[in-house]
Image (cartoon, coloured by chain):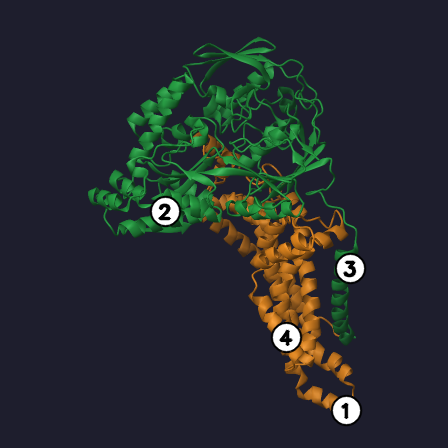
Chain colours: A orange, B green
Amino acid sequence: MPTINLGPASRRLGGVLLIAFLGAALVFFVMRAGHGDPALAALGDQATPEAIAAFHKRWGLDAPLVVQFWRWLSGALVGNFGMSMTVAGGVPIAGLIGSRLPNTLFIGFYAMAIAVAISLVAGTVSALYHGRFIDSAATGIAVLGISMPDFWLSYVLVYLLALGAGIFPSYGFVSPGDSLAGALYSGFLPAFAIAAPMAASFTRILRTALIDTLYRDHVRVARSLGYSGAFVFVHYVFRNALIPYVTVLGLQVRYLLGGTVVVERIFGIPGIGALLVDAAFGRDYGLVQACALTFLICVLIVNFLVDLLCAALNPRAT
Amino acid sequence: MSINRADFTRRDALKLAAGAAAAGLGMPWTLGSAIAQQSATLRAGISGFNVINTLDPMKATLIPEFYVIYGAFNALLKFNAKMELVPDLAESFKVVNPTTLEFKLRKGVKFQDGSDFTADDVKFTLERVTDEKNAAPNRGKVAAIETIQIADPYTIRLVTKAPFAPLLNYLTNTRTATQIVSRTALKSMGDEAFGRRPVGTGPYIVKDWKSGESLELVAFPGTFSGAPKIARVMCPLIAEESSGMTAILGNQLDLTSTAPFADIASLEKRPEVKVLKQAGLNTRYIALNNKKGPFSDIHFRRAVSMAFDRNVLVKAVLFGEGVAIPGVLPPALWADPKPVFGEYVTYNPERARAELAKSAYKAGTEATMLVWGSNWWHRMGEIVAGQANQVLGTKITLQATDFNTAYSRAKAGDYDAMVMGWLGFVDPDEYLGEIVGSKGFRNIHAYSSPKMDALLERGRTELDPAKRKAIYREADMLVSDELPVLPCFCSNIHNLLRPNVKGFVQLPYSNFADQFGGMEVG
């Protein structure tokens, strides 16, 4: 029974908090350094200077930046992110994020599940038959998968499977909270569009790692002791090959959160990526910060979990 | 133990994928909140936009906000299918004298909260917009009103300081802020809550609104124009125009508010959608900084203007879905299909080079053009800059940014040129007065011409429509002569409908929910 050493983990937790703070500060000051004004988004081009001043006062934008940051931070620490200014005037930001995050996480996990499923099968098969036709075919498809941009694949899927064959809806998404079956069905095309390039790169990583492990000494020894091929593969090859595979999986999660913006827009998924884009265009500073912080924390949590998982798979490393 | 865990990962993943596939192919599916399929529901997609910040007419600035406001509210007047002014909440109106308008109001009209509509609500609405404290974006449209007299609960008089010709247009249910709100509802709810759940007299009540996702409207049977036939309207907010198109092709929508220019020709051949289109009330131009070189030089402006072909823009940017214009007035405003193109707004490379010779700025002059928005705006900038550079040897480069940045920079005078446009306005003063009037709030060009201002002032006070038209025509000709901006084109407006959708009348100012009350889904 492997034990997980929590010493490094708690050190990591401190690091996570520090990075979250630095990230939030960076987003705050970079947003303010650029051009643009939320008053323009909220009041339109016809606003008088007095109206703009009143808007700035109403939202505390007339205070020095450091004061504004402190106000934001002290609110954020107790989970109060304030109200949206220009994207959803007067709606609490925490509520907006709370209603959007499940959709993004759902599509992310759905895409990840599809990518993992495809890559486990394709990677294992092409490693076991490496050099033969089935391997070349799988590797060729993988190269194709990596090369396809997700927005292009989205439209191809819509034209073929929604408008052509009529199997899936061409637009729209049912939240998993409303209907899980509906979410799985309406989310399939977007999840697949996101999953395809990931599945391709996962397949290649797994194939390489498996082939690499297949010719290691301990595997040869195990074979020479008379264990069956399947037993050796599962116990000595596959487990070792999973370490680089899981690491790459963890890295891809960042892409899942941020890179889904385009796919979210194409399929009309009310996710947090689309919200961040709207917020940035509308200079809804508080909303941008809250979305960015949510992304950051999600990525840090995933990295943390991946590290724990890798440590569990490979106790020697700790 | 640990080996089993690794094995479990694989099996688990496979199970998950299999489950997902089974759910995808076999499970019955009820469509969710954003898009529904009952025939009692109209699925009206607001495409090309996904931000609606408020539904309070006084605060609204964005066109998608007005799309919804049109259906929840009425104004004193409205435009009919021929774009003629007709009474709406007013029963009739008359010009008592050049500074006084009198409106007889409809009796028995109810607001969506059950309260009665009277002259008091009209007074409250207009005073709310004119009150400087409220900083209403459209305040300028009604600021000329000096006093509001209630003669009796159903008669109201608006008195202006001087004759103000655009006022009737500004009292319509368009982008005006003069949609009549219920005083009792607003007072009891407060501004913020009213902005989320507005109370008007219109045929549809805003029942639910998920920011950035969708709105749900339900019929208001007590509306004075007769109970709507469609009980419920779902309006998903669809950021990508092309997604709106695939949604309606896949029967996920019954109606869209826009369509991509590039796809109109192919959509017109498809049996599953009907394309409605007409010349729109909009104007697209290159805004110029008239205060800073090189565009401070009138000869340089004229040279660039003659160096690009507006008809090429219409073909390459709009795929033919629009017309070139010589000024900033949309031809649809006058129902005049043949505007006059003066010398300086006609493509002529030789004349352009000769004009450049008169300018202080020569070939090799550098300037930056800001582009923003969806890719057709970028293409517009690319073609104008590219043709000018080719013909004149100038070095105009593009800088891509977002609208908020571009407009903030322009307002601060920190720019040379930028692509620009306005949509959905119904009075010539909203175009010429605001864009090239020296006090116009859309005048980001630091352009100030006493001749232009005098014309615009006459236009505002001239109540005879024929004379007023001649004045604005002259002002528009002055634009094509002095070129404070480089006029480019007006685009067509489009709606896509499923063939079973009936009763939607498209109006050139880009209307939307105002039509829902008379619609049917067969």
Badge 4 crowding class, 10 Å Cα cut-off, few under 14, some 14 to 19, many 20 or more, is few
Q: Secondary structure at mark 3?
A: helix
The answer to which image quadrant residue A247 occupies is bottom right
**Chain on which label 3 sits:** B
Q: Nearer the viewer, residue B274 or A41?
A: B274
Q: Secondary structure at mark 1?
A: loop
Query: What is the quadrant of the N terminus of chain B in the image?
Result: bottom right
Q: Amino acid at mark 3?
A: Ala
Real-space Cα separation, disc 1 to disc 4, in angstroms: 34 Å
The answer to whether residue A316 is left or right of residue B341 is: right
The answer to which image quadrant residue B251 occupies is top right
Between tags 4 and 3, which lies in front? Answer: 4
Real-space Cα separation, disc 4 to disc 3, in angstroms: 26 Å
Asked whether the residues under marks 1 and 4 belong to the same chain, the reply is: yes
**Chain on which label 2 sits:** B
Real-space Cα separation, disc 3 to disc 1, in angstroms: 42 Å
Residue name at image x 46 percent, y 47 percent? B376
Q: Nearer the viewer, residue B7 or A68?
A: B7
Q: Amino acid at mark 2?
A: Val
Residue A225: which disc?
Answer: 1
**Chain on which label 1 sits:** A
Q: Amino acid at mark 4?
A: Ala
Residue identified by numbered label 3: B22
Residue identified by numbered label 4: A137
Tell me where residue B366 appears, x and y as whole percent. 29, 50
